Structures are given as structure tokens and as C-alpha cells.
Image: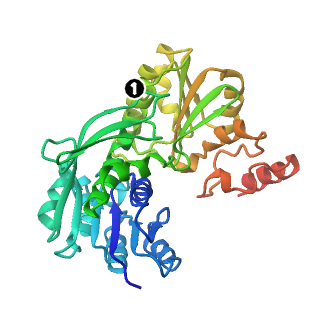
Amino acid sequence: MHLDAVIAITGSCGKSTTAKLTAAALERRQGVFLGYGKNTPSGIRGAMFKMSSSARIWVQEVSGHEHDAMKEALDFVRPTIGVVTTIGMDHISNFESTEDIAVSKGQLVEILPPDGHAILNADDPLVSAMAGRTRAEVITFGSKADADIRLVSSSSAFPERLELRVCAGNEVVDIATQFVGERWTTSILAALATAHVLNVPLKQAAAGIKKVEPLRFKDEVYIHNGMTFIADTFKAPLWTMQSSVDIVKTASAARKVMIIGTISDYRGSARAKYARTAKAALDAAQLVIFFGHHSQRVRRLKADYPDRLFMFETYEELAAFLGDALKKGDLIYIKASGADHLERIVLASEKKPIACHLTNCGRSYTCNHCKYLYGNRRWYRRLLTRKAQA
């Protein structure tokens, strides 16, 4: 099989979305194969074996959650184009610092051939510094004046979706998207830069990007029973919390509700991190709810916000409260780690009432894939008994 280009995408967040956007931006090219979702070495190998013999361009996200995992994946993928989105605190427990994370992600640009391309975020110093670690031609994207793919302006205030004006040289294009929030700008610019390297006109790439919907439970919008839900329940690293709050703060709605689950990927005092997040959320929303075993870390603020701040340690308590508290016209933003399974809030409103109110089920996949979600009462009682005995 001969491939014209192998595009590997990495970064602390937005890898899957960037991969999907990149494939869409290249939709006019023949034989584009997209590998995303499973980004570990074993997952990438599994994706590659599904590739059609007619494939000419392989777009693949690559995880750098550990140094060795990144190296193993790259030795298999052998990219000709490397895209690095941003460096954050995801998986910080596996590294000494964000600089150490950048070392891991930077393995991607180091492996590129001299006739390849390194596509780097000019707005992230840890990413832009990778230009010195590659033999490949460097293409930059971002808001910096010297970026090759430059953001001119952007706007996003829900219910409006993210719109961008972008230029490359003398070419300027307005891009309409289906995404909520400014934070998805990085992924869109990265996809445009990749398309540009492969000689796809910006307007043509923008037309493909316009069709892309957010991935499931990654700032995905649902409207049910007169209420609007935005679910970002896949992961909740501390460093992404403010951008979630910003989505709520700039939104327009009769009442704004923010539900926050387990915050991850930070160092230092958990109480201080939760308290700071609570104050930011209370500045953006009229009703703020914390869920999970860390929820009580914001209790000291309860006296100052008796009718606006609530904490629930079990999902059953949370579900009962929401049943009474939510009303038509509400905008409900849900930010949580995958282990919280707070996507159930959306699924319960979307279809029939769910049966599973477990707080900690231990399953790693999302609830929409769980055969027990709508189980009957007899099944639910047996499940609770087994959980109590474990």
C-alpha cells in the first residue's frame, strides 16, 4: 500500500476532534482514512488493519500519555506530517512537569523526515519551541501576527456557534462551525493548516469543516423537554475548567446551570482547586452543582450561596434534585470526568428514564454503550446488592 501522506496528530487535548476536522477538510481528496478514538499503540495498529487498500492519506491521532507509548506509536505510524495542538496538564501524574509533557509530545516532530511538515501551535510556547527539534518544514497556526495560518477574529456566544475569520497569505476565509466555545479554535486552525500543506484551498477546507459535529459528550448540544444541555463529560482536567466556565458565562439563557463532577490532572490542594472552580462557576451560572466524592470540598462556600450552590455525593441524590430543580428554558452545562458518567443526565432526558443510579460503576465506556442503562428494577436491585458485597 502506498500512502501519499501520513498525518499524526497529538497534544494534551483535542486530538480526536482535530483528526476528524482534518479528514473533513481533506474530503475532496481521494482515499482519506481516519483513525481516531483509540490512540494508544494497540488501538492504532487495530485501526491500521482496517485501512482500505485504496487509502492514500492516513489521518491518525496519537497519544503521548507516556514517553514510551508515544515512541512505540510513532515507530509504527511513521508520519510524514506531524500536528501538535497544545500542551496542558492532562496525565500530569505520569510526568514531572508540563515541559516534560512537551518532551513526550515533541517526539512526533523529531521523527518527521526532512521533506515532511511539522504543524505547530504558534500561541503555545511549549509547542512553538518544538520548531527547533525537527528537520521538517515548520508551518504555524494561531493568532500571532507571523503565524502561517492566522486567526483574524472569532466569536462564540451560545446559542450561536463558533465562527472564525482566518487568513493564509493573501487568502482570507470566514468559517462557520457547529462547535460551542472559543476553545475549539485550536483544532480548527490545525485542520486548516494541514489542508493548506496538502494544497487544499482554505475555502474548500472550510466547507468540509462546516459539516463536522462535536464528538459525543465533548461539548455536544442536546435539546429535550424545553431544556438545553451541553455535555462535556469525557474528561475534566483542571486546566480546562475555565474554558468551560467561559462557555457558560458568554451564553444567553433564561437561567444557566452548571453541573461539575470530578476534576482531574492537577497537583496541590484539591480543596483550593475546587473552591476556585466553584467561585468561577458561580460568576457564570445562577445554579452550580458539584457531584462526587470531592463535592464536599466546596462546602465552606455554601453559607455565602445557600440557594445557588449544592453538593451531592451520590448519583441517586443528584438525579432526585435535578428532577425538581431543572425547568424549561434552562441551559445546563455538564463538566465531568468519564468515571462520573454524568452523561446519564442527558440520556435520562433524551429517551426513557434510566435505571442505573450507581455512583461508581467502574466501567470505562460511556453510558450510551451500556446495556444496563435502562435495566429493569429487579436487575437494578441485584446490581446494588453485588456492588454492596464487593
Residue 329 or residue 201, whichever sits in front: 201
Which of the 4 image quarters holds residue 293?
Answer: top right
Is 207 displayed left or right of 121 in the figure?
Answer: right
Residue 218 or residue 365, whichever sits in front: 218
| Number of marks present in the image shown | 1
In which quadrant is the C terminus drawn?
Answer: bottom right
Q: Is residue 88 visible?
A: no
Residue at the limit of the structure toward the right, as seen here? 378
Q: Image height check: is 171 above or below 298?
A: below
* Applied colour scheme: rainbow
Dot 1, how many residues are within 10 Å of its Cα: few (below 14), some (14-19), or many (20+)?
some
Residue 247 or residue 385, whichever sits in front: 247
The image shows residue 281 at horizontal and vertical percentages of 44, 26
Regarding mark 1 in the picture, which secondary structure is present there?
helix
Residue 171 or residue 1, whichever sits in front: 171
Is 314 displayed left or right of 245 in the figure?
Answer: right
Which of the 4 image quarters holds residue 55?
Answer: bottom left
In which quadrant is the N terminus drawn?
Answer: bottom left
Q: Is residue 349 visible?
A: yes
The amino acid on which the numbered mark 1 sits, given as a three-letter code, is Ala
The image shows residue 308 at horizontal and vertical percentages of 54, 18
The image shows residue 199 at horizontal and vertical percentages of 27, 62
The image shows residue 368 at horizontal and vertical percentages of 67, 51
Residue linked to disc 1:
280
Q: Image height check: is 218 above or below 229?
A: below
Q: Image height check: is 53 above or below 303?
A: below
Residue at 57% across / 14% down in the picture? 307
Residue at 22% across / 64% down in the picture? 118
